[in-house]
Amino acid sequence: MELNEFYNRTREEVAEFSVGRSESAAFLIWFLENFFRLETQDAIDSVCDQTNDKGIDGIYVDDEEEIVCLFQSKFSPNNNQNQGDNDIRNFIGARQWFENEESVNSLLSSTASKDLKSLVERSKISEKTQYRLVSVFVTNKSFNSHAKEYIDVTEDLETYDCNDLF
């Protein structure tokens, strides 16, 4: 399969999840299903991508491994786009909301979106601040040199671009 064919197939599969949600939310659901191997409903329930989500598009808690995964997704409807480091740096800054119980409670009393707050509460994040916190950035774009340099020096960050997904 060629990369352009992958782009087209991915867009078709992502479109199945896009009714009533943004393309980036639909893309994250697709990713969670295909790469994290979550059931469809679990993937949908893990996504909170909307206005004022504080840079967090999704949260998944693995209680067995004691890991909290924070997700940010960037989806482009166009092929062969580049992803720089700015979005990744901003996403890493959002980790501060999850560093300890006090910061989680601050998030819950902030102007954050209702969906984000609900997901944080449902996942009982304030009780799991001792879990390892991993940021997962996923995009259907290709990381440019600035993004790759930042990724190389950032701990507890997993990244997936079109080259990893293809």
Image: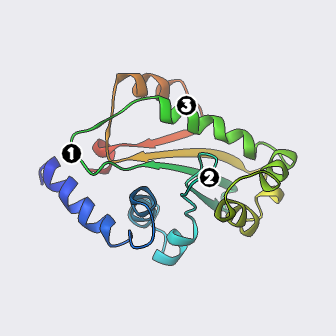
Tag 3: residue type?
A: Arg
Tag 2: residue type?
A: Asp
Left or right: 104, with 49 as reference point:
right
Residue 82 occupies which quadrant of the picture? top left
Q: Is residue 93 above or below residue 118?
A: above
Q: Is residue 127 above or below residue 156?
A: below
Tag 1: residue type?
A: Asn
Contact, mark 1 vs mark 3 (Cβ under 8 Å): no
Q: Residue furthest right?
A: 102
Residue 136, position as x, y percentages in the image: 52, 46
Residue 7, position as x, y percentages in the image: 21, 53
Secondary structure beneath label 2: loop
Badge 2, how many Cα within 10 Å: few under 14, some, many 20+? some
Query: Residues under labels 3 and 2: Cα distance?
Result: 16 Å
Badge 3, how many Cα within 10 Å: few under 14, some, many 20+? some
Q: How is the model colour-coded?
A: rainbow
Which is in the foreground here, disc 3 or disc 2? 2
Query: Residues under labels 2 and 1: Cα distance?
Result: 26 Å
Residue 35, position as x, y percentages in the image: 41, 59
Instruction: Residue 89: give its label.
Output: 3
- Residue in the image at 38% along x and 71% along y: 17
- Which corner quadrant holds the N terminus? bottom left
Q: Is residue 14 visible?
A: yes
Q: Which residue is mark 2?
A: 53
Contact, mark 3 vs mark 2 (Cβ under 8 Å): no
Q: Is residue 76 or residue 44 the one in the foreground?
A: 76
Q: Is residue 156 visible?
A: no
Secondary structure beneath label 1: loop
Q: Which residue is mark 1?
A: 79
Query: Residues under labels 1 and 3: Cα distance?
Result: 23 Å
Q: Is residue 29 above or below residue 109?
A: below
